[in-house]
Image (tube, rainbow, N blue to C red):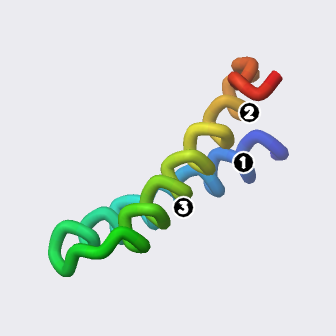
Amino acid sequence: MHKVKIFLFALRQMSEMGIWMAGAEFAGGEIRRQRAMAHKALYSKAMDAVIDRPTLDE
């Protein structure tokens, strides 16, 4: 059940990343691009936790 919650969190972050990337492409702005990259980093870390892959931080 724990991995399912992490997986759902990862999907949410991927969705948010897409929304912020689209906003950055449409309206521009460095803050939108930074937020998109922050969501991408969260998605990456969450998926690493789902498949038990060690992250670069460790």
Q: Tag 2: Cα neighbours inside 10 Å, few (<14), some, or many (≥20)?
A: some
Tell me if residue 27 comes above or below residue 14 in the rendering: below
- Left or right: where does residue 58 sit relative to residue 23? right
Residue 27 located left or right of residue 34 = left
**Which residue: 74% across, 52% down?**
5
What separation in Å lies between label 3 and label 1 (alpha carbons)?
10 Å
Closer-to-camera residue (15/1): 15
How many numbered discs, if any? Answer: 3
Q: Are marks 2 and 1 in contact (CB under 8 Å)?
A: yes
Give neighbour class at mark 1: few <14, some 14-19, many 20+ (Cα, 10 Å): some
Q: Residue beneath label 2, please?
A: 49
Amino acid bearing label 2:
Ala
Q: Residue furthest left?
A: 26
Does the CB distance between marks 3 and 1 fall below 8 Å? Answer: no
Q: Residue at x 48, y 66 (%)?
A: 35
Helix, strand or loop under label 3: helix
Q: Amino acid at mark 3?
A: Arg
Viewed as shown, does residue 33 lie left or right of 51? Answer: left
Please state the horizontal and vertical placement of residue 7, each as a whole percent of the image: 64, 46
Q: Position of residue 32 (x, y in %)?
A: 38, 72
The residue identified by callout 1 is 6
**Among the 4 quarters of the image, the one containing residue 17:** bottom left
- x%, y% of residue 12? 54, 61
For the residue pair 45 and 29, the one nearer the viewer reads as 29
Pick the front one: 34 or 19: 34
Quarter of the picture holding the N terminus? top right
